[in-house]
Image: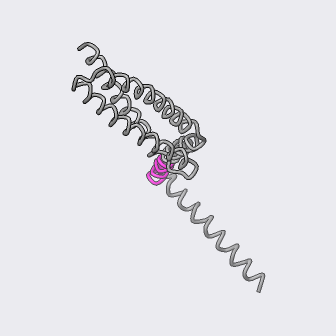
């Protein structure tokens, strides 16, 4: 009876680990939607499918254990456990490769640049509000208007000289 309990505990632990790995890899895959990653994602999908098949096999093994065919079923379970361990290793390697791709670095830089752009926009908005609300604001507006008028006049002069 202890053998059955130990086998079931190991099976439950394996199931939980497969579920955890699947969640982690699904999160990684959702972040990386790029043509360079498609091959790795396809391998991950194959490994996930294999993990599901292994779960089905382990459920069958558990059913056999419950039906008192402990000897043969237990040895098959041990074989399946070693295969599951191998698959976990493969999944971890795939996850490691996905983590280390240049895409993750580029994505991180994009996130940093986006947040920096938002911060700069906020700073500029505050500065513009301050300029509008001060006496300097009127001077600033007249200066901007003067610069625009000077540019317009230069364009008109250029046109007149060409004709």
Image quarter of the C terminus: bottom right
Q: Quadrant of residue 1?
A: top left
Q: Main secondary structure of the magenta part?
A: helix
Image location (x, y in percent) of residue 103 = 57, 44
Nearest the eye: 111 or 123: 111
Vertical placement of 75 versus 56: above or below?
Answer: above
**How many labels were placed on the picture?**
0
Residue 98 is one of the magenta-drawn residues: no
**Boundaries of the magenta span:** 121-134
Image location (x, y in percent) of residue 52 = 37, 39
Q: Quadrant of residue 72?
A: top left
Nearest the eye: 9 or 80: 80
Residue 132 is one of the magenta-drawn residues: yes
- In screen coordinates, is 156 left or right of 128? right
Image location (x, y in percent) of residue 79 = 42, 26
Nearest the eye: 135 or 3: 3
Residue sitting at the far right: 162
> Residue at image x 53%, y 49%?
38
């Amino acid at each position: 009876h202890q053998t059955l309990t130990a086998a079931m505990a190991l099976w439950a632990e394996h199931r939980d680990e497969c579920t955890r790995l699947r969640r982690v890899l699904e999160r990684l895959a959702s972040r990386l939607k790029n043509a360079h990653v498609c091959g790795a994602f396809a391998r991950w999908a194959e490994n996930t499918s294999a993990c599901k098949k292994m779960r089905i096999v382990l459920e069958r093994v558990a059913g056999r254990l419950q039906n008192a065919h402990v000897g043969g079923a237990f040895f098959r379970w041990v074989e399946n456990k070693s295969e599951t361990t191998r698959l976990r290793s493969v999944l971890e390697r795939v996850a490691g490769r996905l983590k280390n791709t240049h895409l993750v670095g580029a994505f991180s830089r994009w996130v940093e640049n986006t947040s920096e752009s938002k911060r700069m926009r906020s700073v500029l908005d505050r500065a513009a509000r301050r300029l509008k609300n001060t006496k300097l604001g009127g001077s600033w507006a007249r200066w901007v208007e003067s610069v625009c008028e000077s540019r317009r006049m230069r364009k008109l002069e250029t046109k007149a000289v060409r004709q």
